[in-house]
Each structure stands twice: as C-alpha cells, then as structure tokens.
Image (cartoon, helix red, strand yellow):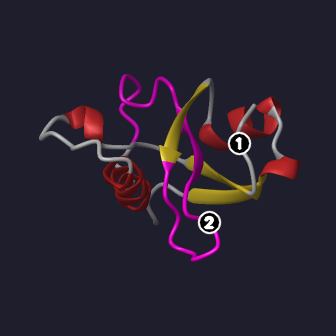
Amino acid sequence: MSGPAVYRLDAKEVTVAKLQELVGGYFDVELAVCDETDCPGHDMAVNGDGKALGLNYNSEATRLYAKGRLSRGILLGPHAADEVVGDVVLVTGGRID
C-alpha cells in the first residue's frame, strides 16, 4: 500500500468540488514549489482537518511545502505544523480562486 498522493491539476481543471473530492473534505490552500522547471511556485490544496483526522504523513507534499516556504524566505520550525498529511492537489498554471 502506498502513502498519500500528490495529484497535479492544471488550474483550468480545478473546481471546489474536485479539490474536495481529491483531498477528502474541506481544504486549505498553501503555497508550494513543484519540481518541474516550468512551475516555480503553485498553490497546494490540503485537507483542512487532516491532522485532526489523523491522516498519514505525506513526505512528497511536505517537501514541496517546505521548498515553497524557503523560496519565500520563511524558515521552518521543528513543529508538526510544518508537516503535510493526507492527499493533496498541486495546482499548476494558475492560482486556486
């Protein structure tokens, strides 16, 4: 069994319903950096209740989130708040409105 997923959607494909379906509920929007050279920074939808629900740690999403924060000069602390849990959606080609 694999861990939580990082889905990638173009901003043109994004709807609130689609994001809720993929993350499994209400979502929060965080900034992230994706690894492809043509997408230096994008929005990432995460389950807003993921930690309270005990969703599994998402190592790939946490790495993208950390890179996004560091690229904007925001230092990460040693707190659980810096960890991303559950399935996430990385939105490319635009912002989540």
Residue at 87 percent of width and 50 percent of height: 12
Residue 65 sits above or below residue 51 on the image: below
The disc labelled 1 sits on which kind of residue? Arg
Q: What's drawn in magenta, residue-wise? A: 32-55
Q: In the rendered structure, are the residues bearing label 2 and label 1 in contact, judged by CB atoms less than 8 Å apart?
A: no
Q: In the displayed image of the protein, which residue is found farthest to the front?
A: 73
Q: Residue 47's spot in the image, x, y percent? A: 53, 32
Q: Residue 24's spot in the image, x, y percent? A: 62, 35
Residue of label 2: 39
Q: Residue 37's spot in the image, x, y percent? A: 57, 77
Magenta stretch, main secondary structure, is loop
Residue at 37 percent of width and 55 percent of height: 71
Residue at 40 percent of width and 38 percent of height: 55
The disc labelled 2 sits on which kind of residue? Cys
Residue of label 1: 95
Question: What element does badge 2 sit on?
Answer: loop
How many residues crowd around disc 1 within 10 Å: few (fewer than 14), some, or many (20 or more)? some
Name the quadrant of the C terminus. top right
Q: Is residue 37 left or right of residue 71?
A: right
Residue at 62 percent of width and 66 percent of height: 39
Q: How much space separates mark 2 and mark 1, taking CA atoms?
A: 12 Å
Q: Nearer the viewer, residue 46 or 57?
A: 46
Residue 28 sits above or below residue 43 on the image: above
37 within the magenta span:
yes
Residue 12 sits above or below residue 74 on the image: below
